Amino acid sequence: MTRETLKRDVVIIGSGPAGLTAAIYAARADLKPLVIEGPQPGGQLTITTEVENYPGFSKGIQGPELMEEFRHQAARFGTEFLVTWINKVDLSERPFTVETDDHIVKAKTLIIASGASAKWLGIPGEAPAPHGLGGLGVSACATCDGFFFKGKPIVVVGGGDTAMEEATFLTRYASRVTIIHRRNTLRASKIMQEKAFQNEKIDFLWDTGVEEIIGAPETGVTGVRLKNLETGEEKIFPCEGVFVAIGHKPNTDMFKGQLEMDEVGYLKTAGNTMATNIPGVFACGDVQDSFYRQAVTAAGTGCMAAIDAERFLDHLPVEMPGGKEMTIEGEIITADHKAIITPEGEIVLNEPDNVPHSNSDAPVPPFQTDGDANSASATDV
Ligand code: NDP
């Protein structure tokens, strides 16, 4: 089957608060952005319930409803949406290429807002049913699934703020919540620790690893096999639910080897901008922020990325990672600035009279500086 080629000024990967805010700004700048929504359109807020800290909603708003509002606002100004899985991204040449099953998308600028996903332990019994007990008592989202554990004993794995928050929230439903942590001190902030310590429904098991989740499709989860990491002693701990809360992983696998990232995989952005190491590629939201991770900060960086992309499109040509400069039309300017190679391979001397695409309406060469174009020699520019 032949794939359709789409050419766009701004392509946004991801449709959480960062991606959709970038879309709103880019669309209002008349850049007609294309948003490629991933496997979880709307991002992490679509699996939460009440959002009480998003400014502008004094009575709170449901996460999915908030994301619907974002989406409608982006669509209102002409954002296009593609709901599809991305197979490959090539950032070596501009326009950049994003490949899906049905499309080859050519992007003059790319805004990455692919977010982060919950991390898993990688132990037997954890995989989604039918391969494991995922969905049958194993979850990574207390607000999504807590309701199903009314009156049941459950465990929460992890020692950070997420684990404390999930455990505290789950005491609304569960008969008992046991936090299982691999060390004997918590990583969570003091205030979250105190909240958990003071909650009578929460117990702690320290220096303990979860080796396996036990149960069957008919019964759901019935327990966990634990290992004391100090003594090596193993035991079965009965429970009916397992919440894994060991942090998040940025969704950046498709950019490995192309974009600079930290050791965890968060994309690096430069200074006060959302620019990555490749000119024309910007990153915003949880994919580049392991610290604040809030909907409102993600939205803020989405706005910044769209403004960065808009300014970038106004200031071409730019240097590519290999050192050569490229215009938005795909023309390559040689390192000594003496020649321009057109996308068709034609070599044109970089002199005002020879500049490709020049006509009487647009006499200014694309690499012109503020100086006098007519008097500047090729090597001056
Ligand atoms: P963290 O990385 O802070 O904590 C992850 C926890 O899981 C750590 O205790 C870690 O153990 C444990 N862990 C990691 N991998 C494994 C593993 N393979 N097996 C067992 N345990 C494991 O992630 P969080 O999601 O908790 O928090 C991330 C950020 O979000 C933080 O900055 C946090 O402050 C913030 N946040 C804030 C909230 C709030 O303020 N309301 C709520 C939630 C998050 P170890 O300690 O040994 O490394």
Image (cartoon, rainbow, N blue to C red):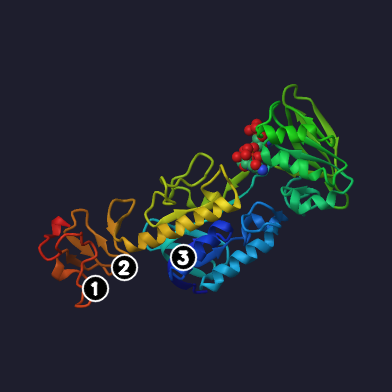
When the figure is inspected, residue 52 is found, relative to residue 229, above or below; the finding is below
Residue 206 location, quadrant: top right
Whole-percent x, y for residue 318 in the image = 30, 57
The residue beneath circle 2 is 329
Query: Marks 2 and 3, Cα distance to the nearest angstrom?
Result: 20 Å
Quadrant of ligand 1 in image: top right
Depth check, front residue: 246 or 76: 76
Give the numbered dot on residue 226. none
Asked if the beta carbon under badge 1 is closer than 8 A to the nearest atom of ligand 1, the reply is no
Q: Amino acid at mark 1?
A: His
Q: Is residue 311 visible?
A: yes
Q: Do the residues bearing badges 1 and 3 touch, measured as CB atoms within 8 Å?
A: no
Give the residue type at disc 2: Glu
- What kind of element bears circle 1? loop
Q: Is residue 163 left or right of residue 334?
A: right
The answer to whether the residues at label 1 and label 2 have Cβ atoms under 8 Å apart is yes
Q: Residue at x 67, y 36 (%)?
A: 160
Residues at marks 1 and 2, CA–CA distance in whole angstroms: 10 Å
Q: Earlier in the sequence, mark 2 or mark 3?
A: 3
User: Where's the C terminus, which quadrant?
Assistant: bottom left
Q: Amino acid at mark 3?
A: Ala
Looking at marks 1 and 2 on the same chain, the residue that comes earlier in the sequence is marked by 2
Sequence-wise, the earlier of marks 1 and 3 is 3
x, y percent for residue 248: 62, 45
Mark 3 Cα shell of 10 Å, populated few (<14), some (14-19), many (≥20): many
Mark linked to residue 26: 3
Identify the residue at horizontal 70%, vertical 30% (top origin). Answer: 182
Taking depth in this image into account, of 316 and 199 the one nearest to the observer is 199
Q: Which residue is mark 1?
A: 357
Q: Secondary structure at mark 3?
A: helix
| Pointer 3 residue Cβ closer than 8 Å to ligand 1 | no
